[in-house]
Amino acid sequence: MDKNAAKKIKNNKYRLYYWPTIQGRGEAIRLAFEHAGVEYIDVARDYIGEESSEEMVSILADNDLERPPFAPPFLRDGEIIIAQTAAILQYLGPKIDIVSDKLADQVFAHQIQLTICDFLSEIHDTHHPIASELYYEDQVVEAKRKAPLFLKFRIPKYFHYFETILSNNTCRSGWLIGNSLSYPDLSLFQLVEGLKYSFPKNFTLLIKEYPFLIKLHDKVRQEPRISAYLKSNRRIDFNEMGVFRYYPELDYKFTSKG
C-alpha cells in the first residue's frame, strides 16, 4: 500500500469495505451513513482499478490481525475493524445518531436487525439453495423447488413480524421503534426494495396485506437525504449478483393465505 493510501486511512474516520458492483449486505450501512449525513469512504467504489480492492484484500489476508474480519462488509474506524452488517450498525447507531440513546431501544434495534439478516440469508438461498460456490444455472432445478416455498411461507412469516412491531408501536410514529427513524427502518426499506425487484409478481400481490410496512417504506424513501442518495450515481442498480436477483422462473403469486 502506498503512502497516500496509508495517509487516507489515518485521516478518514469511517471506511466501508464491500464489493464494488453490488448493493448486497453493504447497502444497509451505506443507507445509514447517507441518512445521517456522515462522510465516509466506500473503498471499493471510491478508488479506480486495482487499488479499489487491494486494501480490502490485504486486510482479509492479514493473518497477524488480532481481531480480523471474516468477510465484507466490514468497517474501519481508526484502528477498530468491525465486521458483519448487524454489528457494524450496532456500533454506528449511537455514534451517528441513528438509534435511540435508551439501552432497551438499542437492544431491540439490534434484535430486529439480526432478524433482517436472517431474512436476507433465506432470500439468497432461493437462487443458491445448494452452495454459493456454484452458479445459479448449476442449481436452477433446486431453486425452482425452494423459491415457491419461500414465497408462500417465509415472506408472510417475516412480514407479519415486522407489521406487528409497527402496529404495536405505542408512539404511532410509523417507525419500528419510538418516535424517530432508526437503522432497522432503513434496513427494512432496503429489504422491501430488494423483494420488489426479485419477486415483482409475488410482491405486488402480497404487500397489500401489510399497510404499516408500505407506510414505512414510503416514509424512508421520502427522507430528504435518502431520496437524494437514491437518485445519485452512488446508488447502483440491482443486478444478477448479490442477494437480490430477478429470475422470472422463480417468481410465483402467493398471498399469506396461499
Image (cartoon, rainbow, N blue to C red):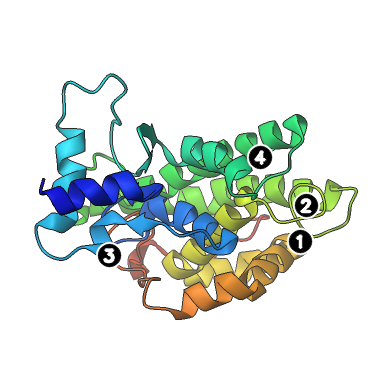
Q: Earlier in the sequence, mark 1 or mark 2?
A: 2
Q: Amino acid at mark 1?
A: Phe
Q: Mark 3 highlights which residue?
A: 240
Residue indicated by mark 1: 212
Q: CA distance from mark 4 to mark 1?
A: 17 Å
Q: Residue at x 59, y 57 (%)?
A: 186
Q: N-terminal of the two: label 4 or label 1?
A: 4
Q: Residue at x 38, y 71 (%)?
A: 234
Residue bearing mark 4: 109
Q: Which residue is mark 2?
A: 166
Residue in the picture at 54% in, 55% down: 32
CB of mark 1 within 8 Å of CB of mark 2? Answer: yes
Lower sequence index among marks 4 and 3: 4
Is disc 3 placed on a helix, strand or loop?
loop
Q: Residue furthest bottom?
A: 231
- Which of 222/204 is in front? 222
> 10 Å neighbourhood of mark 1: few (<14), some, or many (≥20)?
many
Badge 3 or badge 1: first in the primary sequence: 1
Which numbered dot is residue 22?
A: none
Is residue 138 visible in the rendered image? The answer is no
